[in-house]
Amino acid sequence: MKGLDENALKNLQKSPEDEFKVRHLNILYNPEVDKCFCLLEAPNLEAVKKNHKKLGIKCDWITEVKTTA
């Protein structure tokens, strides 16, 4: 989680779409194991990587999914 606390994660989730067109829909986290999982809306995988790099957050893996809606 790279030093992010609950308030920082909440603010990140409420923030508008960034310059890479990434929007945080939901963030699940466990500070005891220093992990968070993000549900993002983004145009592509590269945008998600750029978003995490800008925030200084190491992303262990990214899985692209589609919606049924």
Image (cartoon, rainbow, N blue to C red):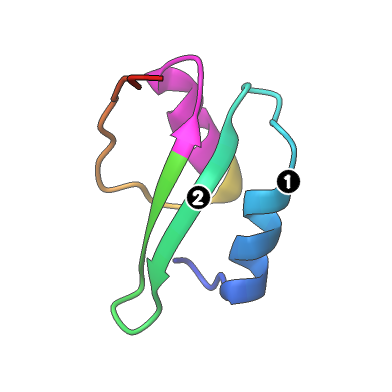
Farthest residue to the top: give it: 43
- Give coordinates of residue 45: x percent, y percent: 38, 21
Residue 28 relative to residue 50: left or right: left
Residue marked by disc 2: 26
Please identify the quarter of the rendering in which residue 64 is found.
top left
- Give coordinates of residue 44: x percent, y percent: 43, 16
- The residue mark sitting in front, 2 or 1, is 2
Highlighted magenta segment, given as a residue range = 40-53
Please identify the quarter of the rendering in which residue 34 is found.
bottom left
Q: Residue at x 31, y 19 (%)?
A: 66
Q: Residue at x 43, y 42 (%)?
A: 39
- Judge the density around disc 1: few (<14), some (14-19), many (≥20) Cα neighbours within 10 Å: few
Above or below for 29 versus 13: below
Q: Residue at x 56, y 70 (%)?
A: 4
Which residue occupies the foreground of this view, 43 or 69? 69
Above or below for 69 versus 25: above
**Callouts 2 and 1 close, C-beta under 8 Å:** no
| Label 1 SS | loop
Above or below for 45 versus 24: above
Nearer the N terminus, badge 2 or badge 1? 1
| Label 2 SS | strand
Residue type (three-letter) at the residue carrying disc 1: Ser
Mark 2 and mark 1: Cα distance apart in space: 11 Å
Farthest residue to the bottom: give it: 32
Residue marked by disc 1: 15
